[in-house]
Image (cartoon, rainbow, N blue to C red):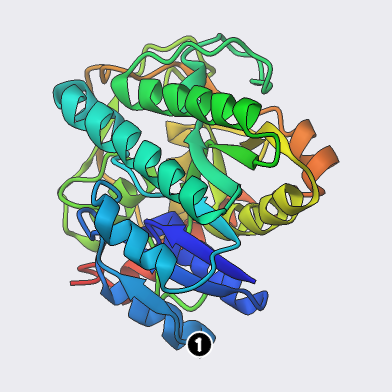
Amino acid sequence: MAILVTGGAGYIGSHTCVALLNAGYDITVVDNFSNSKPSSLKRVTEITGKEFRIHNVSLLDKVGLEKVFSDGEIDAVIHFAGLKSVCESLTMPLQYYYNNIMGTVVLCETMQKFGTRHMVFSSSATVYGGHGHKALAEDQPLAPINPYGQTKMMLEQILTDQCAANPKWSVALLRYFNPVGAHESALIGEDPNGVPNNLVPYITQVAIGKLKELTIYGNDYPTHDGTCIRDYIHILDLANAHLKALRYVFSTSGIEAFNVGSGRGYSVLDVIDAFQKASGIEIPRRIGPRRPGDVPVSLADVSRAKTLLQWQAEYDLLAMCRDSWRWQLNNPNGYS
């Protein structure tokens, strides 16, 4: 079975490529490497011992994308490609709306033309916005508070309309919470450009000495220690969720949303403590102002994924920190 992976060189994409290849799928990767590096895909081959096709193509390039589809039959698409920084989206909203929405529309048009009707879509918990301290369920009203989350919500609606108009289409919307960790080989992991926007790679870069200290963005939130609470999920658990979702879309039609998280919440200080235990390194830190777009608590209700996908997270926070640190130790400059 042939799977097209858009954005396959990225953090989540590369780990999912490993999972797909190890599960016996044939894959083709499309990536324009705007926020990823080709070397991650070479490492995917090193881990799995399997070769696959790679196309340096933007989803905005309809001619180039149609050539990818015409090279061989594609049974399904796992769609990761897109700009993904909440903070960046606040300063570059037009670029986020254009890139994320138009790229997905072009992809869907191409799928339609070539008869590919199955998709697993990379959505985000940012579609929920802020809803207090309760675990978020998929039927929660969507109210994103930043342009990145808005693009994900709009794309979910576009895909919903496409499935309604074309009953043979089948789409799984995976609403990620906070992926962390790395492959146990330490060959692939999270390699952000510049100062990381996400907490754990920020911590690991402080621990390795690339950054002087960790800035905690606000300590006056209504939580047990004043810092934001998030639901973290190991990248290997997240990659496995895509395999489960892929099987699901081949067994049904229509569209369904799934939260993908651990179902447990940890504050910024909780994560720092867990990382210090996993690494034995003290993390210097300072308190900074709140960051625009952050919500106090974001926690997943994962019961739908357990029931319909037969999936649940297996790794705990200590394992996430341990594997993140192993990746950083073995790759102090990422893929460079």
Residue at 14% over, 23% down = 91
Q: Nearer the viewer, residue 282 or 191?
A: 191
Count the numbered circles shown. Answer: 1
Q: Position of residue 68 (x, y in %)?
A: 37, 66
- Left or right relative to 273: residue 19: right
Q: Quadrant of residue 314?
A: bottom right
- Is 256 above or below relative to 219? below
Instruction: List x then y, in percent, for residue 196.
Output: 25, 45
Residue at the outermost bottom position: 49
Amino acid type for the residue under numbered disc 1: Lys
Q: Is residue 312 left or right of residue 261?
A: right
Q: Is residue 303 left or right of residue 101?
A: right
Quadrant location of the C terminus in the rendered image: bottom left
Does the image show residue 238?
yes
The quadrant holding residue 104 is top left
Residue 91 versus residue 75 in the image, above or below: above
Depicted 177 relative to depicted 331: above or below: above
Q: Is residue 228 visible?
A: no
Q: Residue at x 64, y 51 (%)?
A: 316
Sort mark 1 into few (<14), some (14-19) or many (20+) by Cα contacts within 10 Å. some
Residue found at x 44% / y 34%: 269
From the image, tell me which residue sits under label 1.
50
Q: Quick check: 8 left or right of 336?
A: right
Residue shown at 48% from the left, 73% from the top: 72
Q: Quadrant of the N terminus?
A: bottom right
Numbered disc 1: secondary structure: loop
Residue 195 position, x and y percent, is 18, 45
Residue 179: % across, % down? 49, 47
